[in-house]
Each structure stands twice: as structure tokens, then as C-alpha cells.
Amino acid sequence: MKRRFTILHTESHRQWGGQERRIFNEARWMSDNGHRIVIVAPNPSPLYENARRQGWETHTLFFKRWGMIQDACRLRSILRKVRPHVLNTHGNTDTKVGLVAAWGLSIPCVIRTRHSTPPVGNSWHNRLLYRRLCNVVFTTASCISRQIHRDIDVPADRIKTLPSGIDCPADLIDHELARINLAGEIGLENDRRFIGFIGRITRGKGMHVLVEAFDRIRERIPDHHLVIIGDGNLFDEINLLVRERNLYDRIHLLGYRDDPWPYYRAMDAFVLTSIRHEGVPQSMLQAMFAECPVIGTDIGGIPDIVSHGKTGLLVPPEDPARLSDAILQTIQDPEATRSRVKEAYRNVQQHHTLAAMGSKILQVYEQMIYGASSASRSACL
């Protein structure tokens, strides 16, 4: 008989970024598989509002630093009422509130998920949170897991690296049609080709490196244009850089797009030039599933999914010369590129879908709640 769990997530953030999307997608997959979902988050916030639209049970806490004691008392009351099998905290503030509120309530599985890659400091309260007040730590990249084990001395068997799974569409547009559509959207001839980036345009993404790398080789790839899709606090600065270098006819900043999939399908290469604090990037997994060749920097969680020469190409961060070479290699050696694309697609299908992520998480739940033998049986079903 399939067991049904009550899973309560807390989140103090009010934005709708990768962390909040991970919580929502994970919860939706669990809900679709018959589990009860409870969300505790600020109202208003995108996660709270989306949870309400899904029909999940929701509770409002504001998770302000000045109100943490009051929030902990309120959350403890919610936990006693809901009696979850699983409590999973996500943000820094709600983790402090949630793990303290859960202390002594005999919740079978208490999880602290660490989504971001900046190092966790070896402070007394972090040692308390990570080593005493939770049963297991979820991370989204192996570099985070290693740092927590090394610096805070959390036992390795209590840390689980679980990159976010992607929600894969059933159908994707034909590559050639996507390319022609993108050319038409920009106002270019139908034979133009594209290199691109999709994501937040922030300092940590290293967009200036991508512009510099493309500028170095633009005369060698005259049919290719660079397309940057997304918004962020560096949008205007990168737009100005493009104009200062007189590249506005070859580099196009298109802004945010709701549906990124046609753009991945239109590209001859997806390039992620992160320079710091990068987990396993959803955009790169999406590009791989869309059968778009990928190039990334050898930093953070990117090497978790990009095996150099096998599923993509890796370059050092802030090295436009090496990045230029990788772009040329991708375009000029199509046979090797096709081989990497095929292997990357297979790897995403096997390890990085929502179903793959959800199944791994359920195994952890089973083991924590019912013991290792039950988890082994569940894994065989």
C-alpha cells in the first residue's frame, strides 16, 4: 500500500526566484502523487498565492526578524494542529523560526534545505540548526554539501545532494522553425543563427564576460548573433556596454520571456558565464533537455551537470578568451557537439526531471519515517 505523507514547507522569501519555484514544483509533484501539502509563507508572496491557487492548505507568517519569537509560537501551534510527517524549511529566517518551533514535537522528518551556494558560517547558531535541530540537510549542489560537512561538521550521511528537477514539456518546437521564428522576432534574415543566455541579468552571471567573448570572435562567425533573454539589476549596464562597443546589431537584449523553451531550441549554444555562487542551474538543465549545446563556467554546481567534453564544455570563470574558444569549438565541430547534446539529454531524462527528484526525496522520507528497510522496499516499487 502506498503511504501518504503530510509535508509542510516554510519559506520566508517574498520573491519568485529559483528557490521558490523549486519548492512549488516539488510540492506540486508530491500533491499530484497523493501527498498532503501545507505551505507556511508570507501573504502576500508569489509562493503563498500560487499555493492557494493549487488548493493546498496555507498559513500566513510574516517571518520578520523583529517578530521571530511570535512567529515561532504561532508556527508551533500550526505544527501541533497539522501534525506533519515532514517539516522542510528553506529561507534563513524561516529556518531559524521553524526548527526552533519544531523542537520537541516529535516530527519524524525535519529537513533544512540549503538552496544557495555562499558558504554557511561556522557560528554557534548554524551548528545548532544544522547539527541538532534537523534530521537531514538537503542541498542543491555537491559543492554546498562538501562545505557544510567540512566547515560545520555535519555528518556526511545526514546531507543529501538533490538538485532541482525540471518540469519538462511534452512537446517542443522544431529547432529550425524556432530559429526562423527568433530571427523574425528580432527582425533579421531567416538564415541568421544564435548563441544565447536565458536567466537573471545580475553581477554574478558574468554577462560582461559573455559580451567580451562574443566581441572577440564575431568576425569569425558572421552569421551568428548573441541573444540575451531575461531581466535583472544589470540589464541597463549590459545594454550600455553593448552600445559602447557598437555591437547592438549583433547582440540583442530581449528582456523577460514567460516561455523559454522556443529560445533554447533556436540556439546553437547556450552559455552560462557565472562568476560566483551558482548552484545547479535550472536554465542549463532546461537547455540540455531542449537539446541545445551548453557551455558553462567551472564553478559552483555547474560541474555537477556539465562533464567537460561529455555533456558540455567548461571554462574558467572570467576568462573571455577560453570562452571564445569554447563557443568556436561548439559551432565548428558539429559531430562532437551532437554527441555531447545526446549525452546531456539522456542525463537530464534519467536524473533531473521532477519525477526523478521527487522519487529520491520520497526515499529519504521513507527512510527517516519508517526506517531503512522500508526505504529499500519503496525504492524497488
Image (tube, rainbow, N blue to C red):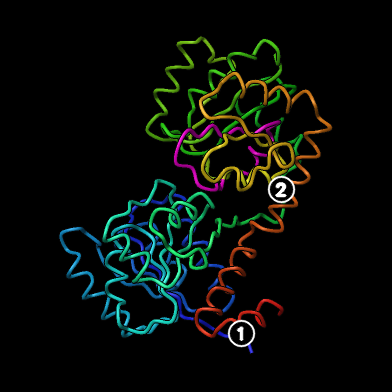
Query: Amino acid under label 1?
Result: Ser
- State left or right for residue 237 relative to residue 73: right
Classify the position of the N terminus by image quarter: bottom right
Image: 145 above or below 247: below
Seen as rendered, the residue at the extreme right is 335
Question: x, y (%) of residue 165?
Answer: 59, 57
Q: Quadrant of residue 312?
A: top right
Check disc 2: other Cα within 10 Å, few if <14, some if 14-19, many if 20+: some
SS class, disc 2? loop
Q: Are marks 1 and 2 in contact (CB under 8 Å)?
A: no
Kindly identify the residue that appears in the image at 47 percent across and 13 percent down: 243
User: Observer-nearest residue: 278 or 245?
Assistant: 278
The answer to whether one can see residue 295 in this image is yes
Magenta region: which residues? 261-282
Query: Amino acid under label 2?
Result: Leu
SS class, disc 1? helix
Image: 85 above or below 285: below
Image: 52 above or below 161: below
Task: Name the residue beneath numbered marker 1.
Answer: 374
> Is residue 8 covered in magenta?
no
Question: x, y (%) of residue 309?
Answer: 73, 36
Check disc 1: other Cα within 10 Å, few if <14, some if 14-19, many if 20+: some
Task: Name the residue beneath numbered marker 2.
Answer: 172
Classify the position of the C terminus by image quarter: bottom right
- State left or right for residue 288 relative to residue 103: right
Kindly identify the residue that appears in the image at 57 percent across and 73 percent down: 32
- State left or right for residue 147 relative to residue 225: left
Question: x, y (%) of residue 199?
Answer: 51, 39
